[in-house]
Image: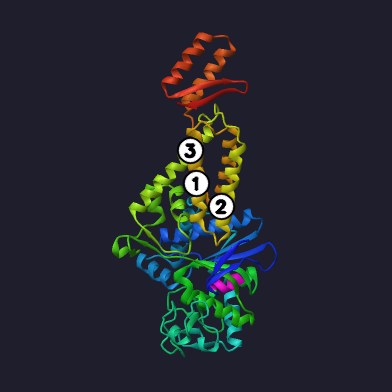
Amino acid sequence: MLKLYNTLTGKKEIFRPRSGKKVNLFVCGPTVYDSSHIGHARTYIFFDVIVKYLKQKGYNVFYLQNITDIDDKIIKRAGEKGIPPQKLAEEFEKEYLEDMKDLKVDSVSKYARATDHIKEIISQVRRLSEKDYAYQIEDGIYFDVSKFKNYGKLSGRKLSQAEDAVSRIDEGKNKRNRGDFCLWKVSKPGEPKWENSWGDGRPGWHLEDTAITEKYFGSQYDIHGGARDLIFPHHEAEIAQMEAISGKAPLVKYWLHTGFLTVEGQKMAKSLGNFITIRDFLKKNSTRLLRLFVIKALYRSPVDYSEKLLFQTKKELERIDEFVDKISQNGSVKKSRGRGKIHHMVVSEIEKKFEKAMEDDFNTPEALAAVFELVNKGNTLISQNKLSPNDAKEILTFLKKVDEIFNFIFEEKPKEKIPQTIINLVKEREKCRKDGLWQKADEIRKKIKTKGYWVEDTKEGSKIKKL
């Protein structure tokens, strides 16, 4: 029985979706003004794992993610570069989506841009104003946090504490309360803007998420995910907005948050020279390594990235690769005396441990421990000449099932393009064989071999292999 740690209640709860096996899940996406870093990668890889696990368990998951393509940071960075904000946002959105593809994060059902949902955003501002939760001042429309009695219930902050925190896009000087946050911001000259009766402007950061989720999920849904630093004020504001509009609580049944990622004990920052983008990481390392690095830590725990820890992860990946290679090639097991009867029980026991770990709030460290236990036992059986081909096949089946979720165990080896010169030589050899010129055919085969390739004759025709 799957249990999730719910930030809203501060405890693990049995997972019961609102509608049978249907799961609506939303995760806060990027603000596309800069390259995504490995801290972002941690969040998106882990929610990719969560969604793939839920799907494997038979849940019908709709995974929605927003893209903030209008924001103060985008406008400022675009101004520094001397380009329109829209162009900057498009460039970094494209880069982000390429990063996700490189990280094998392919479980997102829909990416939703803020600027594609202006109508929905304006509708939410209007309804909040009609219900007297919003008010207008010179620079925009703000949410009055004093009107929402449960403000602070996700973060555990009292209203007085919340008012001491400053939210993004909420610098209005004449706000009623320090903690009030902006719903609609009046645009300054030269800034992007959309027309409406309150004054031409653009959406507040918090509002785009609830406008998007209301469109696709309605006023309530199953899971909301994101990084821990978004709990306050961002996620707190989402709750206030949507529950104020709908009068229904809770907005989200289960809140899941990933822990902070630091670099050798420090917060990642360009000024400290420890800002590692996803692209920079992948120039030196594999996607598989980063996915294993992320998965080996409990998603809600803090992680301190270091070269030492990365090196340790590399050695762990090598252990898995060596084991998979042994049982995949079958050379180490085909002459074994093992019959597979006892060893079936071993795999079955490991499967139970893996399942138990994943059902316990996606405890991937424990799940990985089960995988490495299987590697160790498998290697022992191979060394004792007791692992049968059937055992090897059963282990591979289990590992492939695990990799449907984790996506780092099996390396996809790209098909190497055969040079045209080699293809031409093979064709020439085939013609010689057809004409009975066997000596010449052998000479061509030797020539192909000197160029690093081998021709194997099969019933289906000639097959080319790189030596």
**Is residue 211 one of those drawn in magenta?**
yes
Instruction: Note whether 211 is above or below 434 in the view shown.
Output: below
- The residue under label 1 is 373
- How far is mark 3 from mark 1, CA to CA? 10 Å
- How far is mark 3 from mark 2, CA to CA? 19 Å
Dot 3 crowding, Cα within 10 Å, few <14, some 14–19, many 20+:
some
Q: Nearer the viewer, residue 363 or 143?
A: 363
The percent position of residue 280, horizontal first and vertical second, equals: 37, 53
- How far is mark 2 from mark 1, CA to CA? 10 Å
Q: Is residue 71 visible?
A: yes
- The residue under label 2 is 353
Q: Nearer the viewer, residue 74 or 152?
A: 152
Can you tell which quarter of the image residue 81 is in? Answer: bottom left
Task: Of the two numbered discs 3 and 1 on the same chain, state the one appearing first in sequence.
Answer: 1
Amino acid under label 2? Lys
- The residue under label 3 is 379
Amino acid under label 3? Asn
Dot 1: what SS?
helix
Quick check: marks 2 and 1 in contact, CB under 8 Å?
yes
Q: Nearer the viewer, residue 320 or 1?
A: 1
**Residue at the limit of the structure toward the right, as seen here:** 20
The percent position of residue 326, horizontal first and vertical second, equals: 49, 34
Part of the protein shown in magenta: 208-213
The percent position of residue 168, horizontal first and vertical second, equals: 43, 76
Quick check: marks 3 and 2 in contact, CB under 8 Å?
no
Instruction: Note whether 394 is above or below 240 in the view shown.
Output: above
Amino acid under label 1? Glu
Q: Is residue 30 left or right of residue 77?
A: right
Quadrant that contains the N terminus = bottom right
